[in-house]
Image (spheres, helix red, strand yellow):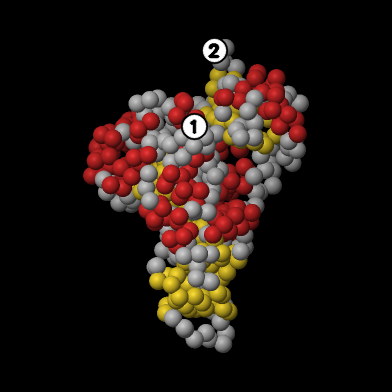
Amino acid sequence: MTDLLIRDAEVDGVPGLDVAIASGRITAVGPNLVAPSTAAVMNADSGALIPGLHDHHLHLHAMAADALSVRCGPPHVHDPAALTDALGRAPGDDNGWVRGVGYIETVAGHLDADTLDHLHAARPVRIQHRSGAMWALNSAAVLAARLNEASHPGVERAPDGRPTGRVWRADTWLRDRLPPSRPLRLNTIGATLTRMGVTGVTDATPDLTPHSRSAIEASIADGSLPQRVHLLGAPVDLETFSPPARLTVGPYKIILADSGLPDLDDLAARIRQVHDRGRAVAVHCVTREALLILLAVLDEVGTIPGDRIEHGAIIPAETIDDLHRRGLTVVTQPGFLADRGDDYLRDVDERDLPDLYRCRSLIDAGVPVALSSDAPCSPVDPWAAITAAVTRRAPTGAIVRSSECITAAQSLARYLTPADDPVLCAPLADVLAAPSADAVQATLIRGHCAYLG
């Protein structure tokens, strides 16, 4: 590993400092350091040197698949005619299937097999709702995926027993019923994250299959995914899983599905099972009802350090003290406000709007808050998410609950991770005045320059 000397960087607000790195570790910080003869030299040009950013909730393989999918919702598609055109132009995968993403009902109403057949019947089509909770399949796809003979509870059926073409919260199950395809490479995802200064990610995909875990491990090993990866979808029994270097295991992901909330006793038993193995839980909670069910169950089973709530899209004010008392962390995504804020203002129940994607009230109450993207459901750019947390501005310019705005410094702090180092092209205060990925001049991972702008 090549030694490195960074000249003229701003470090923790102090300008004009040099930083020496050897064997992937910072060895000295100060003015006018002497460069070893073996060291490469990088001039920061007064830019800020900060720790690498960590996206605390995204989905790596879904991001790779998303990049190969046809856009089926705003801002690309707004009506049935545009959706028909987009599906018709889509190239399809190795097996002739068309995969669509980002659908919302404002485009063509509630999708099912019959509706999709009118839009595109020539090839098997599956379209994911932008919530990530549901897939809609046309009749050709229903036949190919053998939904008629399926017993999975997520397969929606009409009163006569026929599959409607709508499949809820069954991504892995559905994927196993599709024709085999080539593994998706993560090199483009790794490069995109590096360009934005992201040196670590938490993959929040639940119950990853051995094949999916192996693919992530292979991408780390061959360098196509240079980031450190923290898994929420590793098996509950970690005795069967030995992660390699740069891959760590986090809390166990549990979904409280918006489409069907769990039995309280079943949820309590599941959390006890995970806690008994010394592992925390990361519980997907998007609705008020899901959060209240989780808190009721935690009253019974208790919490352990590391337990966290994923999303926390709706957090009633009366529950904030409970979150603090239990030591729960909230991993949230204010970037959704910039991406979908107008839809929320139009569609979310009026009583829930004050509770939508809270930030400031949680921080003020001492609740630990981490920021993330939930990519590909929301744009992966951390600097856009930081801006969204600061402004809470919807696409039309409307502000979604200004009292929940936080400062740029507070936002950045909730994306920072203690290792690795991106270099910004300006002092940190200037960058945070208008956060943008364009400010990332270089990204260093383990002392190696992974990106140079």
Relative to residue 358, is residue 231 depicted above or below?
Answer: below
Q: Position of residue 201 (x, y in %)?
A: 49, 54
Relative to residue 126, is residue 66 depicted above or below?
Answer: below
Q: Which amino acid, by three-letter code, is at mark 2? A: Pro
Closer to the camera in the image, 221 or 240: 221
Residue found 64% across the figure and 45% down from its top: 67
Give neighbour class at mark 2: few <14, some 14-19, many 20+ (Cα, 10 Å).
few
Q: Position of residue 115 (x, y in %)?
A: 65, 20
Closer to the camera in the image, 385 or 280: 385
Residue pointed to by mark 2: 159
Residue projecting furthest to the top: 160
Q: Position of residue 374 (x, y in %)?
A: 49, 44
Closer to the camera in the image, 47 or 134: 47
Give neighbour class at mark 1: few <14, some 14-19, many 20+ (Cα, 10 Å).
some
User: Which numbered disc flags the more N-terminal residue, 1 or 2?
Assistant: 2
Q: Is residue 61 visible?
A: yes
Relative to residue 264, is residue 69 depicted above or below?
Answer: below
Q: CA distance from mark 1 to mark 2?
A: 35 Å
Residue found 46% across the figure and 25% down from its top: 347
Q: Position of residue 184 (x, y in %)?
A: 65, 49
Task: Give the SS element for disc 2.
Answer: loop
Residue pointed to by mark 1: 342
Quarter of the image that includes the C terminus: bottom right
Quarter of the image that includes the N terminus: bottom right
Left-right relation of 215 to 201: right
